Amino acid sequence: MPKGYFAPVLHSHLPFVKHPGFEYFLEEHWLFEAIDETYIPLLMGFKELEEKGVNFKITISLTPPLCEMLADDYLRNKYHGHLERMIELCHKEVERTKDDAYFRDISKFYLERFSAIKSFFEGFLNYDVLNGYRHFSDSGKIEIITCGATHGFLPLMSSNQKAVEVQIELAVATHKKHFGKQPNGIWLPECAYYEGLDEILNKNNIKFFFMDSHGLVYAKPTPKFGVFAPIYTPNGVAAFGRDPDSSKQVWSSKEGYPGDVNYRDFYRDIGYDLDFDYVKPYICPDGTRVFTGLKYYKVTSASEQKEVYNRQNALLKAKEHAANFHINREKQAEYLSEFMDRPPLIVSPYDAELFGHWWFEGPDFLMNLFEEMDRHKVVEAITPMEYMAIYDTNQVAEPNPSSWGDRGYYDVWINGSNDWIYRHLHFMADKMTEFADKYYNLKDSVTVRLLNQMARELLLAQSSDWAFLMTTKTAVEYSTKRTREHISNFVKMLDMIEEDNINEPFLSDLEHKNSIFQGLDFRIYAS
Amino acid sequence: MADKISTVPIDANLKDESFSSNTHPTLLFAEEAKDYSGLDYKIPSKYGIDTLKLLPVNVNTIFVYWEITDKLLNNSPFETFALKLFELTDSGESEVLGFYFKERVSGKYANAHLPSKNLVATIGGIDANGRFVELIRSNKVKMPNDTVTAVTQNNEEAWMSKHSEWTELIKASTTAHFSHAKSSITLVKEMEFLKKYADKAAFGMSSSELVKKD
């Protein structure tokens, strides 16, 4: 028996972004960067572990908006074009730096890297990133879980229970559509929980979810094993709590591994550094400089003076950090097991995009960590379902309403910068439930399409990303306009129904642009 | 009626504290989108529906917003209104705070330490005699908790009083991350108190309390 169990969790999410009217749209580029730097590198790493015969187990949430984007033909084609453009840029860079001893190696590294990503995308993934997740889900290495349908912040929409139910029901249905099976678990958007949510989860056959540490520590009663074993909610759903120590080792800006001087610097990118005319074809067509993904410097120090990135040194450091993280988990498990009658479970959830996008060497760290665990066999990687198969008796407690945001509750998603949105979101949800009953038996196909699109606009407006960005004062204009756009679209369509005057071209445009959940039926909101 | 209303500021510089969702990837991506510009979208400022909603923010704060329509005031043209916040208990409702206002469409933050309380609010007009005439009732909400809680039903298994396991495990389960939380000193004191309580009385989690999952 191992001394402890380790349950890593990667939460993968991006808001639904699709702008078909534009050849290049910055926010679509977010998706492409995440595929280049996080999703494909992780899948490539898992493939390598599989080929080496290394045991690894991980839980990965793939949110419905992300699944819908990854499966979208338009965006998949656009991503392929993006890869071709990146390789073209890499070739130019290799040529530009061929006599430059300082940058020659790093430019070659990127050419090899993007070529490998393209081969993996065209080959193993068959032009569909979800194929990689399906492969490891089928082999039992990855437990893929779902999330709220559009990452809606559930506690703040719970005055209309149907709105929460639809977020969960639709998430489960979308998961089944993409993976052909019921999800066992859910990543609650922002880990946000409120009393009563477990009943809805249970109705949807969700077996487990995750919370921040104080969701368990302040549960009623405070659990016997703290966060080192799950609890069952009154409705029998398992809640797993985040381990603060292992989280901090990676997350902390002061003590965390990603800040090591040998790792790649996130901000220095040739999109900003090189001559404007030279990089212009690879940045925004309007001339706005953006990240290209080719970053040549290492963290070096806090100063502006950066040294060139050395890939081999960074990989050695990732290996060293994985060994350090592993030994810390061993010590932690040994210490905790003194106080428990079973091996402690250490749950370490992270945003997936932290690995690769923010922390470039994060995927290498993770693969090294699995190799360490497999070699030493002291702490064993496990998924929540596997843990519950071994320990199916757990304490019952009422989880504490909480989130994993700043201050631990709901402050990030409701404060002076974003509280204005709730009046609209609640109105839209109430109206949607009213219309679902009123028009339940409606046959007119155009009006049904309109009602379906109203449901899509509501769901997209509910994304917690917009409120988050308003709070952080990052992309405030974009997040505000995205919210206002969905509210405005909803209200316009509401007027069309009430005035019996449907503008079909307007509806068609929205169906094309905000095309999430193609099979959505507005009657899902019926009582 | 005590007026406990104030706005609730949130740290402007969330990026300084990166041990949480503050380094959310959307934020990293969105850093590039500062110059986004596009169409403006018109949205209503009100919906013509009588509304009163309560939204918990944290243990100490609740947000409330409302709309009072002309139709509701047809027969009772109040000029001043009041909002009353009640705790719901087994014996009924007890008022915890309230305030007067004149705005027909607005929202406010109310501050009071209300851990684990069930709350509901009402809005009423103040008539010529100064009496409160209820007009709208809100949704009910449950506030979050910020306290370590012990089981008290039985002492069948006194593991907590014999050893320090529980204290150690709960200390290891906490972190300075959540600023709402008590300081570690307060937390330790709280647990010491619970431990003393456990030594004297019924305290602990019985193995019979553990429920086997289906």
Image (cartoon, coloured by chain):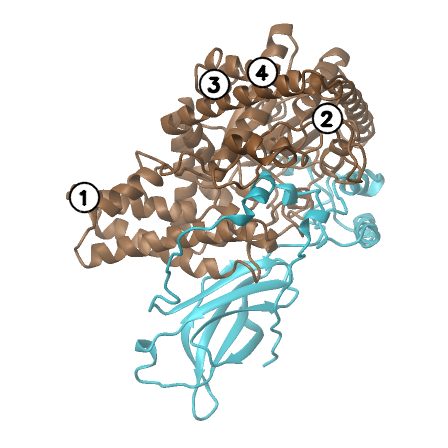
Chain colours: A brown, B cyan
Q: Are marks 4 and 1 in contact (CB under 8 Å)?
A: no
> Disc 3 or disc 2, which is closer to the eye?
3
Determine which residue is flagged by label 4. A44
Q: Kindly identify the amino acid type of the residue bearing the numbered disc 1.
A: Val
User: Closest to the observer: A55 or A386?
Assistant: A55
Marks 4 & 1 on one chain: yes
> Disc 3 or disc 1, which is closer to the eye?
1
Is residue A61 among what the camera can see?
no
Determine which residue is flagged by label 1. A446
Question: Under tag 1, what secondary structure?
Answer: helix
Question: Under tag 3, what secondary structure?
Answer: helix
Q: Kindly identify the amino acid type of the residue bearing the numbered disc 4.
A: Met
Q: In which quadrant will I find the N terminus of chain A?
A: top right
Determine which residue is flagged by label 2. A342
Q: Are marks 3 and 4 in contact (CB under 8 Å)?
A: no
- N-terminal of the pair, mark 4 or mark 2, is 4
- N-terminal of the pair, mark 3 or mark 2, is 3
Marks 3 & 1 on one chain: yes
Q: Which mark is residue B44?
A: none
Viewed as shown, does residue A255 lie left or right of A522? Answer: right
Question: Under tag 4, what secondary structure?
Answer: helix
User: Closest to the observer: A132 or A233?
Assistant: A132
User: What's the residue at 46%, 18% (across, down)?
Assistant: A131
Q: Which mark is residue A134?
A: 3
- N-terminal of the pair, mark 3 or mark 1, is 3
User: What's the residue at 44%, 56% (across, down)?
Assistant: A159
